[in-house]
Amino acid sequence: MQIRELAIPDSYELTPRQFSDDRGLFLEWYRFDVLEQAIGHSLDLRQANLSVSRRGVLRGIHYAAIPGQAKLVTAAAGAVLDFVIDIRVGSPTFGQWDTVLLDSVDRRVIYLSEGLGHAFVALTDDATVTYLVNDVFRPDREFGVNPLDPAIGLELPKEAGEPLLSPKDAEAPTLEEAGRLGILPTWDDARRHYAALASVG
């Protein structure tokens, strides 16, 4: 498995090695030791999620208060363009983003540390995304930022068509509004939390 850090600190792309023959293929899409070496601490997985989306569905930008949900995301079928957005106030890359194509060809995986924003747009019908997280869903600690906020400027591929959002995502605050509301994580809180995780591991 190859792993590289993305342009947003504390997020990573993992590319598994695939073994195929006339029966099909096999791969490992999560290895605790490989990920631990990259991020500096172990990942205590608590929940697995799965979503199926039609082409053009845009989910996110979602995030949780720190401590919250770190995510390990992959596409089991179809294809999505996955976004990691730095919403940590004070971060050197605040308001910036990076992408990874998740599909059933290269079967890449993206890891997002706690405090980062996450979104994806489905490039195919029946795009099936599954992800492992290190905490259960806690509605009182879950927040969102509007994925169409022009200040963030996510570049959605033309092949996805017109983006289809849930009412909740469409009504989410802009990054600036979320900052004024005081609901964004901070770079300093994130750094302290990551250091605490590393000291335990």
Image (cartoon, rainbow, N blue to C red):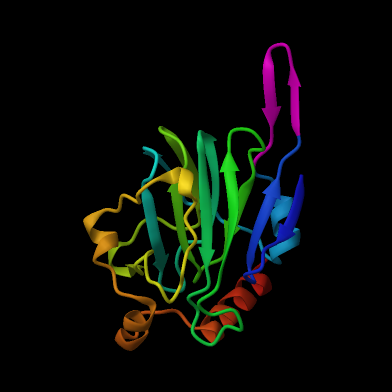
Between 78 and 156, the residue placed more toward the observer is 156
- x 22%, y 57%: residue: 167
Q: Whole-percent x and y of residue 38?
A: 73, 61
For the magenta stretch, what is the residue range?
18-29
Residue 12 location, quadrant: bottom right
Would you say residue 161 is visible in this rendering?
yes
Would you say residue 48 is visible in this rendering?
no
In the current view of this chain or complex, which residue is farthest to the top? 22
Position above or below: 8 against 48: below
- Of the 4 image quadrants, the one containing the C terminus is bottom right
Between 187 and 104, the residue placed more toward the observer is 104
Q: Whole-percent x and y of residue 183?
A: 35, 80
Q: Whole-percent x and y of residue 21?
A: 75, 16
- x 37%, y 65%: residue: 148
Q: Is residue 95 left or right of residue 150?
A: right
Between 155 and 144, the residue placed more toward the observer is 155
Position above or below: 186 against 13: below
Q: Is 173 one of the magenta-colored residues?
A: no
Position above or below: 121 against 16: below
Position above or below: 122 against 135: above
Report the number of discs. Answer: 0
Q: Is 27 one of the magenta-colored residues?
A: yes
Q: Whole-percent x and y of residue 125?
A: 41, 33
- x 60%, y 53%: residue: 100
* Magenta-colored segment: predominant secondary structure: strand
Q: Is residue 112 left or right of residue 177?
A: right
